[in-house]
Image (cartoon, helix red, strand yellow):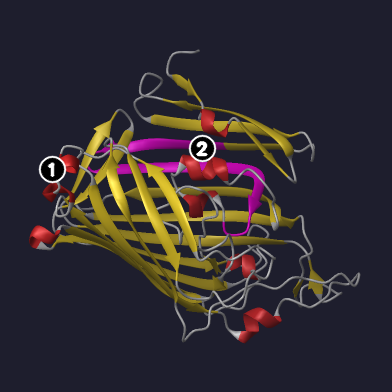
Amino acid sequence: MYPGIEVGPFLSAGAYNTIEGLRLRAGFRTNAEFSKVWVMDGYLAYGFKDGVMKYGANAKYILSRKPWAEIGARTSYDLEQIGLTSEAVGNNSLFAAYSRFGRYRRGYYQREHMAYIRGEIIKGLTPMIGIRQRSFEPLYNFAYITENEPSGQSRTYHNTELITELRIAKNELFIYNDNDRISLGTAQSPIYTLRYSLGLQNTLGGDFNYHRFTLSMADNFRLGILGRSYYTLSAGYTPSTLPYPLLFPHLGNQSLFYVGNAFNMMNYYEFLSDRYASLKYEHNFEGLLFNRIPAIKKLKWRTLLNVNVLYGGARQSNQDIIPDYDLQGNAIPGFGSLNPSKPYVEIGYGIDNILKFFRIEALHRLTYISQPRTIDGIPINRFAVKASAYFTL
């Protein structure tokens, strides 16, 4: 291979789903041998059933390392699912690869373009500003009511948004690996992330004016000999009336793997909200229990407990914008939303640090279990055992 260019990730090289059939993907990324300031990656993917070529490309230029500053752009055209976008899944490559398999109940093609600039203006204070344009081309029965079409309905849309973000992380520590900057967290201070998105109608083809606010706070603290607790508080609100793919789809997890940023007993796109507040809490007892059992002490296993709670809901106006039938008389599925007075709750308990690499956890879903299936006919499970893999010291 050309010096400075790496191929992969191999986890995403192949998949099989109901829309694409066999999907093959080839990707690359550059490293510091290629350039000390330019970071690029991209991929091509092809589905043999839908016959559509997909692609993605990212480019980033490092303006400064101390303080850190970068400017970047990306473009892509790919198959997505409601609530399972790359933005929602994050950097979990195993979960991202798994979600490409199986049945796509609410799949759509999305074209995306984005440009941004991000920089640390003072230590611990990092703003970002960007502009993003996306299209929505559904592959299932979908429509929304709009005054922009003579028929009063539309199946597709474009949205353009100006994104501003502020990250506050006092005394955050980083390690640098060539062109990668990896956070080690903060010693004693929470990490706050505030984001505001402004929908721009009639700008780059945007169909909607809207406002969207999100806020998150992540921190950890020690409880003496009882171990250490980790938590993330987050909230989001949009006062605008929008088609439900533009609301907040809460990240579910139907895989066999535990995913830290997901609700692990919730199904994909089971609930969407226009305002929400959530708590993800985990407590690691470290060696409190197993260190007292001689036969297990040498294994250095650690017990843990977690609780995920979500409050949310969707205004009637956001439900009414979806008609019961499209112009051809086809039924249009709605979306599931939470009762604002009843939270979604799941709890888990398990063991981590197995061979310093594995985690196994038993999970229970405590609420929204009276119905056997979701609005899309997916079975609702009350209990599951899931595993994950990561390295701990």
Q: Can the viewer see residue 262? A: yes
Judging by the rendered image, the residue that carries numbered circle 2 is: 58
Q: Secondary structure at mark 2?
A: strand
- Which of the two residues, 200 or 80, is positioned nearer the viewer here? 80
Q: Is 337 displayed left or right of 258 in the figure?
A: right
User: Label 2 amino acid?
Assistant: Asn
Which x, y percent locates residue 388? 40, 44
Q: Can the viewer see residue 191? A: no
Tell me what residue is drawn at x 53 percent, y 76 percent: 368
Tell me what residue is drawn at x 45 percent, y 42 percent: 72
- Which of the two residues, 260 or 177, is positioned nearer the viewer here? 260
Judging by the rendered image, the residue that carries numbered circle 1 is: 294
Above or below: residue 106 compared with residue 5: below
For marks 2 and 1, give the one nearer the viewer: 1
Q: Is 97 displayed left or right of 68 in the figure?
A: right
- What predominant SS class does the magenta segment belong to? strand
Residue furthest out toward the right: 328
Mark 2 or mark 1: which comes first in sequence? 2
Instruction: Magenta stretch: give its range.
Output: 57-83
Residues at circles 2 and 1 in contact by the CB criterion of under 8 Å: no
Which x, y percent locates residue 214? 41, 68
Crowding at dot 2, Cα within 10 Å, few <14 / some 14-19 / many 20+, comes out as some
Above or below: residue 137 compared with residue 181: below
Q: CA distance from mark 2 to mark 1?
A: 52 Å
Specify the quadrant of the image occupied by residue 391: top left
Badge count: 2
Tell me what residue is drawn at x 38 percent, y 23 percent: 35
Is 255 contained in the magenta span?
no
Q: Secondary structure at mark 1?
A: helix
